[in-house]
C-alpha cells in the first residue's frame, strides 16, 4: 500500500496533472470568455487576468495530487519555481493562441478553442519540466 506522501508513478502523476490542467482550462477559458463577452475586454487583456488564476489553481491541485510527496519544503519557493515553468510554457501557449486568432479570426467568438490548443502544447512541456525539476521524486521534502 502506498503512503499518502509517497510520489506517484509517471502514468498516475501524468493523469492527475491532466485533470489539474483541465480544471485550469476551465478557469482560464471561463474567466477570459466572461471578461471579453460581459465586460468588453480584449482577448489579450482577458488572458492577463485568466492565466494567473489558472496557474494558481493548477499549482494547488498539482502539489496536492499529481506531485504529492515531492517539491520544496518552502511553498513560496515551490510556487515561484512552478510559475517560472508555467511562464516558459506560456510562451508556447500564447504563441499558439495568437497564431490561432491570426489564422482564424472567427475563433475570437469561441476563445476556448485557441485556449485549449495552446494549453495542450504547454501542458506537455510543463509536465516534463516540472517533474524533472521542481517535483523530482529523488528529492522529497519530507
Image (tube, rainbow, N blue to C red):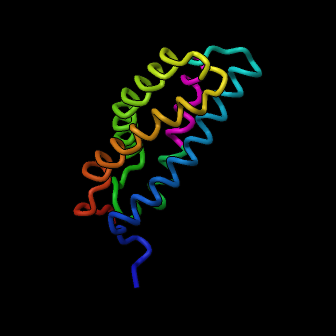
Identify which residue, 122 or 72, lies in the foreground.
122
**60 or 36, which lies in front?**
36
Give the dominant element type of the magenta stretch: helix, strand or loop.
Answer: helix
Whether 120 is drawn above or below 87: the answer is: below
Residue interval drawn in magenta: 45-56
Left-right relation of 57 to 84: right
Q: Nearer the viewer, residue 47 or 82?
A: 47
Residue at the location (49% across, 14% down)? 102
Q: Quadrant of the N terminus?
A: bottom left
Viewport quadrant of the C terminus: bottom left
Q: Does 53 appear in magenta?
A: yes
Farthest bottom residue in view: 1
Q: How many marks?
A: 0
59 shown above or below 108: below
Q: Report the residue at 40% width, 70% height from top.
A: 5
Picture coordinates of residue 68, whole percent (x, y)? 41, 63
Q: Whole-percent x and y of residue 98?
A: 47, 19
Q: Based on the picture, tell me whether residue 136 belongs to the magenta stretch.
A: no
Furthest residue toward left: 138
Q: Quadrant of residue 122?
A: top left
Residue 6 sits in which quadrant?
bottom left
Which residue: 37% across, 26% down? 91
Amino acid at each position: 500500500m502506498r503512503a499518502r506522501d509517497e510520489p506517484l508513478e509517471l502514468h498516475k502523476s501524468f493523469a492527475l496533472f491532466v485533470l489539474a490542467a483541465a480544471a485550469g482550462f476551465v478557469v482560464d477559458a471561463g474567466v477570459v470568455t466572461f471578461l471579453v463577452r460581459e465586460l468588453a475586454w480584449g482577448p489579450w487583456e482577458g488572458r492577463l487576468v485568466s492565466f494567473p488564476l489558472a496557474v494558481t489553481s493548477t499549482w494547488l491541485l498539482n502539489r496536492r495530487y499529481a506531485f504529492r510527496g515531492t517539491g520544496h519544503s518552502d511553498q513560496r519557493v515551490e510556487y515561484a519555481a512552478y510559475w517560472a515553468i508555467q511562464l516558459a510554457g506560456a510562451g508556447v501557449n500564447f504563441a499558439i493562441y495568437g497564431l490561432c486568432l491570426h489564422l482564424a479570426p472567427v475563433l475570437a467568438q469561441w476563445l476556448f478553442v485557441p485556449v485549449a490548443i495552446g494549453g495542450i502544447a504547454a501542458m506537455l512541456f510543463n509536465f516534463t519540466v516540472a517533474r524533472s525539476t521542481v517535483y523530482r521524486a529523488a528529492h522529497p521534502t519530507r
